[in-house]
Image (spheres, rainbow, N blue to C red):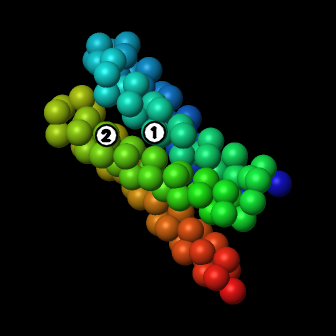
Amino acid sequence: MNSILQDKSYIFAISIVKLAQFLQKDQKEFVISNQILKSGTSTGALIREAEFAQSQADYINKFYISLKEANETNYWLNLLKDTGYIDGNNFTSMEKDNKELIAMLVATVKTLKSKLKK
């Protein structure tokens, strides 16, 4: 059974893939599109990887790295907006979804770390 975090990160990854396709096909932009493709899809992949973590520490680490990837994705989204590769509407929608993932990942990491200390 998938968690809300898994579902949201997967849906977000689909939008990232579509964004990268648009950037490469229509905008002829390949460097940033590859960067955002890696970080934006890694977020969900790491959440999925956590299912088979080798230890509790590894489990927490997967979520922490996922958080870092989501934060990197936010950087690339801002850069794409500020350089005119994506418009404000696309940026706003994607940034909202990404910030929601970041908030969920922050809460997950905090909860897991507090449980580990007990």
Q: Position of residue 107 (x, y in %)?
A: 54, 72
Quarter in which the N terminus is drawn? bottom right
Q: Quadrant of residue 31?
A: top left
Q: Is residue 24 above or below residue 92?
A: above
Neighbour class for label 2 at 10 Å: few (<14), some, many (≥20)? some
Labels 2 and 1: the sequence-earlier one: 1
The image shows residue 13 at horizontal and vertical percentages of 54, 38
Read off the residue under disc 2: 76
The CA span between labels 2 and 1 is: 9 Å
- Residue 39: numbered disc: 1
Q: Residues within 10 Å of mark 1 (few under 14, many from 20)?
A: many
> Camera-side residue: 52 or 48?
52
Question: In this rendering, is residue 110 above or below 51?
Answer: below
Say what amino acid the circle numbered 1 marks.
Ser
For image coordinates 37% across by 13% down, the residue present is 25
Rendered image: mark on residue 108: none
In the image, what residue occupies the spot 40% across and 25% down? Answer: 34
Measuring 61% from the left and 53% from the top, which residue is drawn there? 62
Please identify the quadrant where the C terminus is shown: bottom right
Residue 64 in the figure: left or right of residue 4: left
Q: Secondary structure at mark 2?
A: helix
| 2 and 1 marks in contact (CB < 8 Å) | yes
Q: Secondary structure at mark 1?
A: helix
Regarding residue 42, the answer to whether it shows in the image is: yes
Question: Relative to the observer, which residue lies in front, 101 or 51?
Answer: 51
- Tell me the amino acid under the disc marked 2: Trp
